[in-house]
Amino acid sequence: MLFLVGLDDHDSHFGGCTTYVAYRLIRELANTRLRVIPLPALVRLNPYIPFKTRGNAAVRLVIESENTTEKDIIEHIREIVDKYREKRGKADPGIAVTRVDNIGKLKILYKIYRKAVTDIITIDQVDKLCEKFNIYVRGGKGRVGAVSCLGFLPDIDSTFELLAYGDPSTKKRINIDVLSFSVLDQLFKLYTFANVDVENEKILIFPSGPDPVIYGVRGDSPLHVIFLSSLVQHVAKIEIEGWLLFRTNQATGIHVEYSENKIRTFNPYRTMIRVSKISRTEDRHLLCFTENGPSVFSYRHIGSPCSFLERSLGDIVEVWGGLRIKDGRYFIYVEGCRKLSRRLVQLNNPRCPRCGSALKSLGKGRGFFCKKCNIKIPTLHKIISEVDSSNILFSLPYLSEFRHLMKPTDRVGIERMANMFEDLEIPMWII
Ligand SMILES: [Zn+2]
């Protein structure tokens, strides 16, 4: 008999990490009659929910066991998990267990998973669902993520991440130079991704922070991810406790994939806009106003989207990101944008026929005014000129500014590669 197990909120702002708890749990379950079927899933949920830690991650396991009940499993897991979870801070861990016995239930769980990635799910909704479908849950707010991750379907698109754990204090001693690491990155390209931010010369596999994750290697081939991790281990000579390979929805862009996302604060959103007005805030962040739908906000430091949008005045552009209300108006905080149509000409004010300086418009049909000569010229019209626009059609932030679910350009066209490894026995997925 198969069971789905969901874990959430075992981390906190003080450190600790839901994935580390899952790692310890899987190791301890190896000595029991509950068999964990590889690979565990690392499931990222809506990244814009403000009251979650930045990653908003849950872990889903599939467990095989005969003659066991959900109640036994949940009590057993709780006992183990309690030893390792972070007890300081506001973490409110949740555990969910349900039997894989009913297609109707699995369909509903998939719907809930999609909603948890693109929207907000309340505890009430989760509790009602659990009652109706016999899902056993324990814990506080973490119930939401624990139940939401149960319906993750990797076949639609998924990637792999290997997380290596150890003593957080060893992070300071890691010393790999960007250049030699970039060579490794090049060798493993297409099979692994987002290892280095080349533009800013930053290695991205070593997270800072107080949690026990020493490094994380992401990719579309589990074998290459493990191979690169072994090399990193060898080159950097890092002491680790062990590692665990996850299948994950990271880097799939799934949160902005669905067209039915609602316009609501904290929702990911993707739409087409016509850029009708551009301005910069005092801090040089970009505001981009549109005639239809939400406006757009782009942080100055994220990279090229700011200048890309600035050059797109009058164009039709597809933008995606997270929704927030600012001064009573919806803004999409940009994760990426793409040009859909390009204007070829634009209308400009004419120059003064007397002195040659730029004229000021007096309003539609009322002509122009020259400040220098102090005259009104009612007979002139706007002039048509060519637009100096670039050929760049796609714009994404620097890799170091990526959130977990955002899809890097390296993955475009190789989606679902993970499915090829479905029947493969993967060596060293846990050590
Ligand atoms: Zn003049």
Image (cartoon, rainbow, N blue to C red):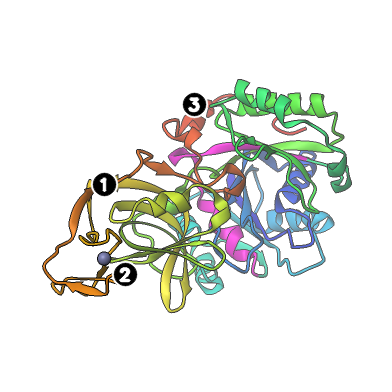
Residue 302 spot, x, y in % from top left: 56, 51
Q: Which region is colored magenta?
A: 141-164
Residue at image coords 26%, 47%: 341
Residue 333, above or below 25: below
Label located before the other in sequence (1 or 2): 1
Farthest residue, direction left: 379
**Mark 1 secondary-structure assignment:** strand
Q: Which image quarter has ligand 1?
A: bottom left
| Mark 2 CB near ligand 1 (8 Å cut) | yes
Kind of residue at badge 2: Lys
**Residue 427 in sight from this viewpoint:** no
- In the rendered image, residue 173 lying in the magenta stretch gets the answer no
Badge nearest the viewer, 3 or 2: 2
Residue 142 spot, x, y in % from top left: 65, 64
Residue 328, above or below 8: below
Kind of residue at badge 1: Ser
Distance between mark 1 and mark 2 Cα atoms: 38 Å
Give yes or no for contact between labels 1 and 3 (Cβ–Cβ under 8 Å): no
In what quadrant of the picture does the C terminus appear?
top right
Residue 6, above or below 330: above
Binning the other alpha carbons within 10 Å of mark 1 as few (below 14), some (14 to 19) or many (20 upward) gives some
**Mark 2 secondary-structure assignment:** loop
The residue that label 2 is drawn on is 372
Residue 420: numbered disc: 3
| Mark 1 CB near ligand 1 (8 Å cut) | no
Binning the other alpha carbons within 10 Å of mark 2 as few (below 14), some (14 to 19) or many (20 upward) gives few
Residue 227 spot, x, y in % from top left: 69, 23
Residue at image coords 64%, 27%: 185
Residue 341: numbered disc: 1
